[in-house]
Image: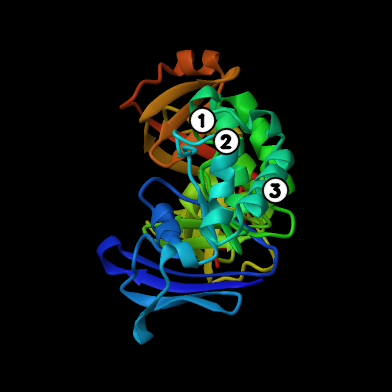
Amino acid sequence: MTFNLNAALRARNFDITLSLGPGETVAVLGPNGAGKSTLLGIISGLLRPDTGYAELSDATLFDIDSDQFTPPHRRGTALLAQEPLLFPHMSVLENVAFGPRAAGASRHDARQTALHWLDEVDATEFAQRRPGQLSGGQAQRVAVARALAADPKLLLLDEPMAALDIHAALLLRRLIKRVLTGRNAIIITHDVLDALILADRVIVIENGHIAEQGRTRDVLEKPRSRFAAGLSGLNLLTGTITEFGLTTNEGLAVAGYREDAALPGNPGAAAFPPSAVSVYLTVDHGSPRNTFKVTITDLEPRGDQIRVRAGHLSADITPAASAELDLLPGTEAYFVVKAAATLIYPSC
């Protein structure tokens, strides 16, 4: 089973090309308003793009140029949202059996399918309950069973753990990992754990476009977008690779360890952890180091450290150092990073 999509929606500045290989799960990450829900809306048929096409296996979901648009219930997709959205007037068993019945299965066969999937998600004991009698985690497990009972060719998950507490999210993540084996799925998430545990590949969307993509660990270890860098806990500067490091888009020279693949003249990125950043109030701090004049925007506790933020850059220092420097939002300071702690690599 494969999936291919190329779609644009001008009103939302959305233009994305996406493919899935057989049995592949892709995690889609990005800031709020980036276009993640728009992507699922287009795939599921809830939104009609201005241009493009999508095909799932041998079936066309839409081809705007040919005026083909398959309605949502005939696409072979199933959407699992943040909220379970179970029918409140039906029992759990009837909820899960709804998909097979709507597809034409007999009452007996639909019931057997529902019982099978309730067993798969460890929810058989809830079969005769109404959704209102379930906890949030229990209801979401039933929602997973209902989605899978429809036998979708492509499972769409829109932050399914977002409304759950930590314990329930952990159990559901394990369950989803098990039932996704061998299935095509796209999961929208803000949680890097979801990407690491559930996905074969990650895509980062910013402003309606794909900012970067690749194996989850590769993207997190060498981010090329500010959003991915934030997930990874790294500072990120982008620009043009030079013989000694990088010249940022703002004209700053950054020295660092340059990977062999980072060829001078090509687009590149410089990454370094907040723990490698020292904070000074004056520019006289010795060399050779990278020095960035900044204005402190925020301070927040992080374990036994203080995270000092200055725009898109951050530093981790001790509470004692923060008190000695008398740092406050609005304070002008210098972030200093050794070249040996800065990695320079290609950004495309």
Of 228 and 183, the residue lying toward us: 183
Of 89 and 310, the residue lying toward us: 89
The residue that disc 2 covers is 92
Distance Cα–Cα, label 1 vs label 3:
20 Å
Residue reaching furthest to the left = 11
- 296 horizontally vs 5: left or right: left
Q: Secondary structure at mark 2?
A: helix
Q: Are marks 1 and 2 in contact (CB under 8 Å)?
A: yes
The residue that disc 3 covers is 112
Three-letter amino acid code at the position of disc 1: Pro
The residue that disc 1 covers is 131
Q: Are marks 2 and 3 in contact (CB under 8 Å)?
A: no
Distance Cα–Cα, label 2 vs label 3:
13 Å
Mark yes or no: residue 158 visible: yes
**Rendered residue at 43%/60% (across/down):** 39
Mark 1 or 3: the one toward you = 3
